Image: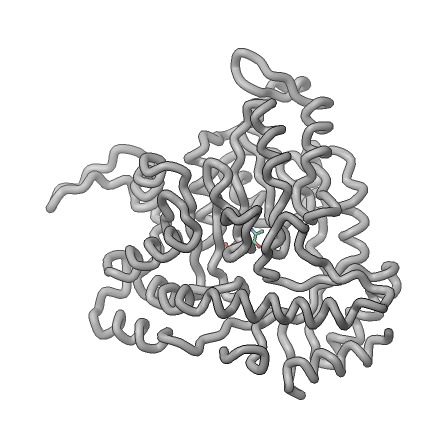
Amino acid sequence: MDCNCFVDFVRDTYSTNEFIPLHAPTFSGNENKYVKETIDSTFVSSVGKFVDDFEKQVEAYTRSSRAVATVNGTAALHTALHMAGVRANDIVVTQALTFVATCNALHHMGAEPAFVDISPVSLGLCPKALAEFLEQYAEVTGQGTVLKSTKQRIKAVVPMHTFGHPVELEELMLVCQNWRLPLIEDAAESLGSFYKGQHTGTFGEYGAISFNGNKVITTGGGGMVLCKTLDSGAHTKHLTTTAKVPHPYEFFHDEAGFNYRMPNLNAALGCAQMEALPMFIENKRQLAQVYRDFFNDSDFTFVTEPEYAQSNYWLNAIICPNPQVREKMLKETNENGVMTRPIWQLMHRLPMYKDCLRGNLTYSEFIESHLINIPSSPIKKLIGV
Ligand SMILES: *Cc1c(COP(=O)(O)O)cnc(C)c1O
């Protein structure tokens, strides 16, 4: 298969000769109506009914005890990590292959990431690699689980559901239990993805979702913390809303809170997008099937959901036969107005994380040099978007 053939196929699939982006938002429902309603009401900011409605809709869809809307996905992760007790100088174990926000969220609280390899099954944190890493570097003490070398506390494990494909959660949870480590899910990419029928982001103590413009649904910018219990949910809400103790006119704050609340204007967009979410997911799953058939007899491997999962197929991806073919593919598709993109560089290649502790990253390195993402927006002709 050559690149021109792929470009023609994508153009044909999207029925357009214009530029084809990697992932564009779709607004074809009540978006205009709800946003206009918000503006007309003047309640565009931190008070208004859409924030509550949006949180309720996400709770119902994910079957989470409590969902707390935030200004973006990074803020949701920051809040989740803080709620889980991560503090300055702690270690948080995550995967080397992720978007930088996973690391930035913990870096800004003074914690440090440690990097573990990904699994060929999910492209997310590998349970076996995690166990090996902990075996080599960690010990359980009276003060909790610590690094053998520096005695820094290891305070959380943060897997990320890459491109929406759920990680091997049962196996990961078992390793976390053995090492007494809380699991926090970076579910930024996986709204609409289920592990054995249960929504991602609801297995760990907390899960963080993103509604950035390129995600499955968008609020412009936005995020959500999924909380395991009503109590932790109430505390999370309190923390993200300046920790103000409710009172008709007094200003009393009982801890150092964040101003991470999602504005009502963004939540209005979110409510309309939630109505369309099931349709987006169905559409994206159909698109993935179309790609899968296309790449079936080629040198490329189309990345599919693990057999235990139902994925939202947020970003479609292919693994190229070698790095040279990958370069050629990236160059020729982008030159021809079909956007493709290499996967993120591994976190330890970035200057601020280059000295962080890391295990063997063989599979992460392979994926880093072979994988590209291909256009993944919902397609009008598949179902009535
Ligand atoms: C999008 C994303 C985030 C952050 O979301 P923002 O809303 O852009 O802050 C975090 N982690 C991963 C893996 C993401 O893809």
The percent coordinates of residue 211 (x first, y second) are 47, 60
Q: Is residue 347 visible?
A: yes
Q: Residue furthest left?
A: 248
Residue 47 to residue 17: above or below: above
Q: Which residue is at 69% across, 32% downward?
A: 357
- Quarter occupied by residue 5: bottom right
Residue 62 to residue 205: above or below: below
Q: Which residue is at 58% across, 29% downward?
A: 176
Indicate left or right for 294 with 142 as reference.
right
The percent coordinates of residue 146 (x first, y second) are 60, 20
The percent coordinates of residue 194 (x first, y second) are 54, 51
Q: Which residue is at 60% across, 29% downward?
A: 174
User: Foreground residue, 315 or 256?
Assistant: 315
Display coloring: one colour
Query: Which quadrant contains ligand 1?
Result: bottom right
Residue 194 to residue 267: above or below: above
Q: Which residue is at 80% across, 57% downward?
A: 370
Indicate left or right for 241 with 296 as reference.
left
The percent coordinates of residue 286 (x first, y second) are 62, 70
